[in-house]
Amino acid sequence: MKKSLFIFGSLFFLTSCTQRGCQSWQRTTQFSARTYSITVYSGGDAVFTDTFHGIINGEEHTDGIYYFKGDTLVEVSGDYIIKSEN
């Protein structure tokens, strides 16, 4: 009885860790391009706006994002609003 309970507990633990890992990966990875409107704020004023069709990627351990617009890498950090136009 103890052995089967241990095996069941181990499988449950491994499965729950796998699911959390996949959820985290899915939040930081996007597979399809969308149309976005991005507005960056400083002191309550809009200081940068951009609209593009592509994929937004999240920076690890920061509040920033980055995306490619044509051949240009655009990095955004701080206070910003992202709106999906799709």
Image (spheres, helix red, strand yellow):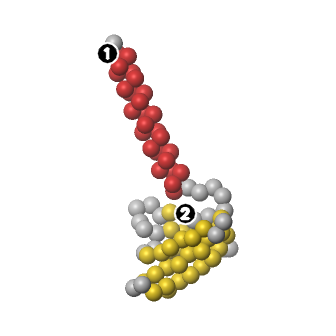
Q: Position of residue 2 (x, y in %)?
A: 31, 15
Looking at the rendered image, the quarter that the N terminus falls into is top left
Q: Nearer the viewer, mark 2 or mark 1?
A: 1
Query: SS of the residue at dot 2?
Result: strand
Residue 32 in sight: yes
Of residues 34 and 60, the one drawn nearer to the viewer in this rendering = 34
Q: Is residue 53 left or right of residue 77?
A: right
Of the numbered discs 2 and 1, the one sitting upstream in the chain is 1
Is 67 above or below relative to 14? below
Which amino acid type is shown beneath numbered disc 2? Answer: Asn
Q: Which residue is mark 2?
A: 57
Of residues 44 and 68, the one drawn nearer to the viewer in this rendering = 44
The number of discs equals 2
Q: Position of residue 40 (x, y in %)?
A: 49, 79
Q: Which residue is mark 1?
A: 2
Res. 5 image quadrant: top left
Which amino acid type is shown beneath numbered disc 1? Answer: Lys
